[in-house]
Amino acid sequence: MRHNLPMTRRTLLGGAAGAAAWGAAEPTPVIDTHIHLYDPTRPGGVPWPPPNGRVPYQPMLPRQYREVIKGLPIVGAIEVECSPLVEDNQWVLDVAAQDTLVVGTVGNLEPGRPEFRRQLDRFRKAPLFRGIRCGYLWGRNLRQELAKPAFVADLKYLAQAGLSLDTANPNLQLLQDVLGIADRVPDLRVVIDHLPQFPPPAQAPASGAYTAAMRELGQRPKVYVKVSQVLRRVEGRVRADLPFYRERLDEIWDTFGPDRLLYGSDWPNSDQWAPLPVGFALVREYFAGKGREASEKYFWKNSLAVYGWVKRANPRPR
């Protein structure tokens, strides 16, 4: 896949040399909180990605992910479900069980439906099942669902089970909806995925609403953010230089602080912008400037607080 990305010396640090760039000390171990697993060669194919899109339409499984992260200090990954099919939750659990690099999965179930609690009780018996994803995907409308008492009751059931809620996809309405969820179900850990990909609205009224939503979200202690999907294509070229992104990353840091930010690669969806090591190098550089403690929180400690992922074969993190 052509990325139209100049492979500079800084970009190349994202590969094997990237681990050394952390300094003389042992590199901070990393939990990647956002990867997708799928196999288009399965009988019946897959709902996503489309055959002719930017995302690779070929098997993307733990063994392929292991190849991509060679030379990086990634020691575990959390799969986020990319299919609306209930049984695909089980397929992912079966795949994850065969590779200890996968330390958790975020499933795809629909709160508010009569079968939700039965389905959740079924899948959460597996220790790797750490939560669900809900939002503006697969034709679903979070705002409409949030108005239904059964939906809110099921989110409370999710919180009581000690599981988390990931959201998709970021826009102003979703940010406002997350506020609604946080206020109705304050014990639920909510993760806003891919916030860097959603820039502040340009129009003055919308910008004011965005600023207000961000300010309020910053005051909700159980709302977390994945600093994922950071890279952008500008005039046909993907920018990989930190100064271009610093203002946006600073805004997210200033709003949520060091205890509520998570690393996620969004692999292999991230391939439509650049290879995983490129995006990794950029956020590594940014958080290295925040100090070792902040880097450890971002790259693994906060993910443990959010997901309670399962420590498997790798001796790190500790």
Image: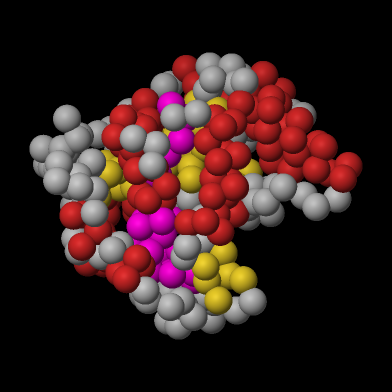
| Residue 287 or residue 33, whichever sits in front | 287
Give the quadrant of the C terminus: top left
237 displayed left or right of 19: right
Residue beneath the point at 54% across and 45% down: 249
Give the quadrant of the N terminus: bottom left
Residue beneath the point at 51% across and 61% down: 231
Q: Please say if 74 is above or below 214.
A: below
63 displayed left or right of 121: left
| Residue 274 part of the magenta segment | yes
Residue 185, horizontal then vertical, whole percent: 61, 19
| Residue 102 or residue 90, whichever sits in front | 102
Residue 302, horizontal then vertical, whole percent: 37, 30
Residue 312, horizontal then vertical, whole percent: 16, 38
Q: Please say if 210 is above or below 275.
A: above
Asked where in the image residue 205 lies, by quadrant, the reply is top right
Residue 59, horizontal then vertical, whole percent: 34, 71
Residue beneath the point at 24% across and 48% down: 22
Residue beneath the point at 25% across and 34% down: 310
Q: Please say if 43 is above or below 287.
A: below
193 displayed left or right of 178: left
Q: Which residues, given as a range, are shown in magenta?
A: 259-282
